[in-house]
Image (spheres, rainbow, N blue to C red):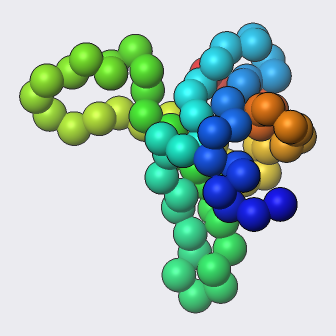
Amino acid sequence: MILSQLGYKEIINLNNGERLGLLADSDIYVEEKTGKIIAFLVPEKRLQFKIFGELEYIEIPWDSIRKIGNDMIIVELENY
């Protein structure tokens, strides 16, 4: 699978079934020395209409990813 195929997959939390967003809207936190993906930073959709200030992000550690399917990415987040 190539990166462009991952972009429009929806990220779903396994614990509560909540849609967290699209991978295409996310930033990726990468370890500079090794190139290893540490986490995805998904903009919080609840704050999407915020006019002033910085966006808030949901940090999804790479280790929280349980399955990458055809249409979605299943993650397991306890505290969200």
Classify the position of the N terminus by image quarter.
Answer: bottom right
Position of residue 61 in the picture relative to residue 17 (left or right):
left
Residue 77, visible in the rendered structure: no
Residue placed at 56% from the left, 28% from the top? 21
Residue placed at 79% from the left, 18% from the top? 15
**Residue 79 in which image quadrant:** top right
Question: Which residue, as the protein is rendered here, is positioned at the far bottom?
Answer: 33
Residue placed at 78% from the left, 51% from the top? 63
Name the spot of residue 25 as percent of width and height, x first.
Answer: 48, 41
Classify the position of the C terminus by image quarter.
Answer: top right
Position of residue 72 in the picture relative to residue 66 (left or right):
left
- Count of labels in the image: 0
> Viewer-proximal residue, 12 or 63?
12
Residue 27, visible in the rendered structure: yes
Question: Which residue, as the protein is rendered here, is positioned at the far left?
Answer: 52
Name the spot of residue 76 as percent of width and height, x first.
Answer: 78, 31
Name the spot of residue 26 as percent of width and height, x first.
Answer: 50, 45
Q: Is residue 21 above or below residue 25?
A: above
Position of residue 51 in the picture relative to residue 65 (left or right):
left
Residue placed at 56% from the left, 69% from the top? 30
